[in-house]
Image: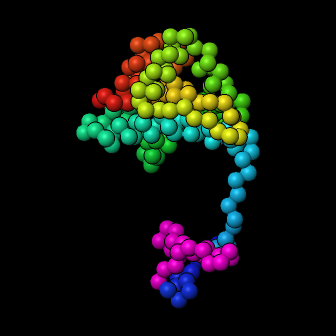
Amino acid sequence: MAKVDGPIFSVEARGKLADAVVYFPWKGRHIVRQWLKPTQPRSIKQGFVRVALYTIGKAISKILATAKGSAVDSELYKEATSSVPSGLNWNAWLCGGFVDRMGSAGSLVTGSFESVVDEYSSLGTDELSSWAIEGSALGLSDFAFSYGYTANIPAGLQLYAGAIAAYERSLGSFTTEPVSMGTEEIGAFADAFTEA
Protein backbone atom coordinates (compact mmCIF):
# COMPACT_ATOMS: atom_id res chain seq x y z
CA MET A 1 0.00 0.00 0.00
CA ALA A 2 1.50 3.32 -1.01
CA LYS A 3 1.06 6.49 1.06
CA VAL A 4 0.74 9.71 -0.89
CA ASP A 5 0.37 13.35 0.20
CA GLY A 6 -1.08 14.89 -2.93
CA PRO A 7 -2.56 12.12 -5.05
CA ILE A 8 -3.16 13.11 -8.66
CA PHE A 9 -2.11 16.68 -7.78
CA SER A 10 -5.11 17.18 -5.52
CA VAL A 11 -5.71 17.66 -1.83
CA GLU A 12 -7.68 14.45 -1.58
CA ALA A 13 -8.69 11.61 -3.87
CA ARG A 14 -11.29 8.90 -3.27
CA GLY A 15 -12.48 6.03 -5.37
CA LYS A 16 -11.32 3.70 -8.11
CA LEU A 17 -9.34 4.66 -11.17
CA ALA A 18 -10.13 2.21 -13.96
CA ASP A 19 -9.60 -1.28 -12.57
CA ALA A 20 -6.07 -0.44 -11.49
CA VAL A 21 -5.85 1.61 -8.29
CA VAL A 22 -8.04 2.84 -5.43
CA TYR A 23 -7.58 6.12 -3.57
CA PHE A 24 -8.97 6.58 -0.04
CA PRO A 25 -8.26 8.35 3.25
CA TRP A 26 -7.13 6.17 6.15
CA LYS A 27 -6.19 7.42 9.62
CA GLY A 28 -5.77 10.95 8.33
CA ARG A 29 -3.50 9.98 5.43
CA HIS A 30 -4.21 9.68 1.74
CA ILE A 31 -3.65 6.12 0.57
CA VAL A 32 -3.47 4.53 -2.86
CA ARG A 33 -3.38 0.79 -3.44
CA GLN A 34 -3.97 -1.73 -6.17
CA TRP A 35 -7.64 -2.45 -6.87
CA LEU A 36 -8.64 -6.03 -6.04
CA LYS A 37 -11.87 -7.51 -7.31
CA PRO A 38 -14.03 -8.53 -4.33
CA THR A 39 -14.89 -12.21 -4.14
CA GLN A 40 -17.61 -14.09 -2.32
CA PRO A 41 -16.61 -17.75 -2.31
CA ARG A 42 -19.74 -18.76 -0.33
CA SER A 43 -18.02 -21.73 1.21
CA ILE A 44 -19.78 -23.93 3.74
CA LYS A 45 -17.68 -22.65 6.63
CA GLN A 46 -18.21 -19.03 5.56
CA GLY A 47 -21.96 -19.71 5.51
CA PHE A 48 -21.85 -21.10 9.06
CA VAL A 49 -19.89 -18.10 10.32
CA ARG A 50 -22.25 -15.66 8.63
CA VAL A 51 -25.40 -17.35 9.87
CA ALA A 52 -24.05 -17.41 13.44
CA LEU A 53 -23.07 -13.75 13.36
CA TYR A 54 -26.32 -12.77 11.67
CA THR A 55 -28.29 -14.68 14.33
CA ILE A 56 -26.69 -12.86 17.26
CA GLY A 57 -26.56 -9.61 15.31
CA LYS A 58 -30.32 -9.57 14.83
CA ALA A 59 -30.87 -9.99 18.59
CA ILE A 60 -28.35 -7.28 19.46
CA SER A 61 -29.86 -4.91 16.90
CA LYS A 62 -33.16 -5.09 18.81
CA ILE A 63 -31.37 -3.97 21.99
CA LEU A 64 -29.88 -1.03 20.11
CA ALA A 65 -33.17 -0.13 18.38
CA THR A 66 -34.97 -0.13 21.72
CA ALA A 67 -32.30 1.96 23.41
CA LYS A 68 -32.32 4.54 20.60
CA GLY A 69 -36.09 4.55 20.32
CA SER A 70 -36.97 5.41 23.91
CA ALA A 71 -36.03 7.97 26.49
CA VAL A 72 -35.24 5.21 28.96
CA ASP A 73 -32.61 2.70 27.93
CA SER A 74 -33.37 -1.00 28.14
CA GLU A 75 -31.99 -3.05 31.04
CA LEU A 76 -29.87 -5.10 28.61
CA TYR A 77 -28.43 -1.95 27.05
CA LYS A 78 -27.59 -0.45 30.43
CA GLU A 79 -25.96 -3.65 31.69
CA ALA A 80 -23.98 -4.22 28.51
CA THR A 81 -22.70 -0.65 28.27
CA SER A 82 -21.73 -0.56 31.94
CA SER A 83 -20.00 -3.97 31.84
CA VAL A 84 -17.99 -3.67 28.62
CA PRO A 85 -14.21 -3.40 29.12
CA SER A 86 -12.64 -0.08 28.24
CA GLY A 87 -11.83 0.36 24.56
CA LEU A 88 -14.43 -2.10 23.23
CA ASN A 89 -17.82 -1.51 21.63
CA TRP A 90 -20.58 -2.94 23.81
CA ASN A 91 -22.34 -4.70 20.92
CA ALA A 92 -19.17 -6.39 19.63
CA TRP A 93 -18.26 -7.42 23.18
CA LEU A 94 -21.74 -8.87 23.75
CA CYS A 95 -21.63 -10.68 20.39
CA GLY A 96 -18.31 -12.16 21.48
CA GLY A 97 -20.10 -13.90 24.35
CA PHE A 98 -22.15 -15.88 21.86
CA VAL A 99 -19.17 -16.63 19.62
CA ASP A 100 -17.06 -17.72 22.61
CA ARG A 101 -19.72 -20.31 23.47
CA MET A 102 -19.18 -21.91 20.08
CA GLY A 103 -15.40 -22.16 20.06
CA SER A 104 -12.27 -21.57 22.05
CA ALA A 105 -10.83 -18.07 21.69
CA GLY A 106 -13.54 -17.11 19.21
CA SER A 107 -12.71 -19.83 16.67
CA LEU A 108 -16.03 -20.74 15.13
CA VAL A 109 -16.39 -24.15 13.52
CA THR A 110 -19.34 -25.51 11.58
CA GLY A 111 -20.40 -28.04 14.22
CA SER A 112 -20.44 -25.43 16.98
CA PHE A 113 -23.39 -23.49 15.55
CA GLU A 114 -25.25 -26.76 15.00
CA SER A 115 -24.71 -27.59 18.68
CA VAL A 116 -26.45 -24.33 19.67
CA VAL A 117 -29.32 -25.14 17.28
CA ASP A 118 -29.55 -28.68 18.72
CA GLU A 119 -29.54 -27.31 22.28
CA TYR A 120 -32.37 -24.91 21.38
CA SER A 121 -34.32 -27.63 19.55
CA SER A 122 -34.11 -29.96 22.57
CA LEU A 123 -36.02 -27.56 24.81
CA GLY A 124 -39.49 -28.43 26.03
CA THR A 125 -42.56 -27.44 24.05
CA ASP A 126 -43.53 -24.65 26.49
CA GLU A 127 -40.03 -23.14 26.43
CA LEU A 128 -39.75 -23.32 22.62
CA SER A 129 -43.14 -21.65 22.32
CA SER A 130 -42.10 -18.95 24.80
CA TRP A 131 -38.84 -18.19 22.97
CA ALA A 132 -40.77 -18.01 19.67
CA ILE A 133 -43.54 -15.75 21.01
CA GLU A 134 -41.14 -13.38 22.78
CA GLY A 135 -38.78 -13.23 19.78
CA SER A 136 -41.62 -12.38 17.41
CA ALA A 137 -43.01 -9.81 19.87
CA LEU A 138 -39.63 -8.03 19.78
CA GLY A 139 -39.81 -7.88 15.98
CA LEU A 140 -37.35 -10.66 15.19
CA SER A 141 -38.22 -12.63 12.06
CA ASP A 142 -37.18 -15.99 10.68
CA PHE A 143 -34.46 -16.16 8.03
CA ALA A 144 -32.42 -18.72 6.11
CA PHE A 145 -29.16 -18.65 4.18
CA SER A 146 -28.69 -20.25 0.76
CA TYR A 147 -25.28 -21.73 1.61
CA GLY A 148 -23.50 -23.14 4.65
CA TYR A 149 -26.18 -23.67 7.29
CA THR A 150 -29.32 -23.55 5.17
CA ALA A 151 -32.03 -24.50 7.69
CA ASN A 152 -34.50 -21.86 8.88
CA ILE A 153 -33.36 -19.75 11.85
CA PRO A 154 -36.52 -18.89 13.80
CA ALA A 155 -37.06 -15.71 15.82
CA GLY A 156 -36.93 -17.71 19.05
CA LEU A 157 -33.45 -19.03 18.27
CA GLN A 158 -32.25 -15.47 17.65
CA LEU A 159 -33.55 -14.40 21.06
CA TYR A 160 -31.99 -17.53 22.57
CA ALA A 161 -28.63 -16.48 21.07
CA GLY A 162 -29.02 -13.12 22.80
CA ALA A 163 -29.63 -14.92 26.10
CA ILE A 164 -26.47 -16.98 25.59
CA ALA A 165 -24.49 -13.80 24.97
CA ALA A 166 -25.90 -12.12 28.12
CA TYR A 167 -25.22 -15.22 30.20
CA GLU A 168 -21.68 -15.71 28.87
CA ARG A 169 -20.85 -12.05 29.57
CA SER A 170 -22.25 -12.36 33.11
CA LEU A 171 -24.62 -9.45 32.77
CA GLY A 172 -25.98 -8.76 36.25
CA SER A 173 -29.48 -10.20 36.31
CA PHE A 174 -29.00 -12.94 33.71
CA THR A 175 -27.51 -15.71 35.80
CA THR A 176 -29.51 -18.69 34.52
CA GLU A 177 -28.09 -20.77 31.70
CA PRO A 178 -30.51 -20.19 28.75
CA VAL A 179 -31.08 -23.92 28.27
CA SER A 180 -32.45 -24.02 31.85
CA MET A 181 -34.71 -20.96 31.61
CA GLY A 182 -38.40 -21.46 32.25
CA THR A 183 -41.16 -19.52 30.56
CA GLU A 184 -41.18 -16.77 33.24
CA GLU A 185 -37.42 -16.25 32.93
CA ILE A 186 -37.70 -16.15 29.12
CA GLY A 187 -40.40 -13.49 29.42
CA ALA A 188 -38.24 -11.50 31.87
CA PHE A 189 -35.28 -11.70 29.49
CA ALA A 190 -37.41 -10.41 26.60
CA ASP A 191 -38.77 -7.62 28.83
CA ALA A 192 -35.16 -6.54 29.51
CA PHE A 193 -34.97 -5.42 25.86
CA THR A 194 -37.56 -2.72 26.48
CA GLU A 195 -37.59 -2.03 30.22
CA ALA A 196 -35.03 -0.28 32.37
Front residue of 144/178: it is 144
Q: Say which quarter of the image contains residue 195.
A: top left
Residue drawn where x is 26% and y is 36% of the image: 72
In percent of width and height, residue 174 lies at 43, 22
Front residue of 135/166: it is 135
- Considering every residue shown, the one lying at the far bottom of the view is 9
Q: Say which quarter of the image contains residue 53.
A: top right
Q: Say which quarter of the image contains residue 151.
A: top right
In percent of width and height, residue 75 lies at 34, 30
Left or right of 45 on screen, residue 100: left
Residue drawn where x is 62% and y is 30% of the image: 152
Residue 20 seen from this side = yes
Looking at the image, residue 149 lies above or below residue 157: below
Magenta-colored stretch includes residue 158: no
In percent of width and height, residue 143 lies at 57, 35
- Considering every residue shown, the one lying at the far left of the view is 71
Magenta-colored stretch includes residue 23: yes
Point out the stretch of residues depicted in magenta. Answer: 11-32
Residue drawn where x is 64% and y is 73% of the image: 33
The C terminus sits in image quarter: top left
Front residue of 188/37: it is 37
Query: How many labels, in total?
Result: 0
The N terminus sits in image quarter: bottom right
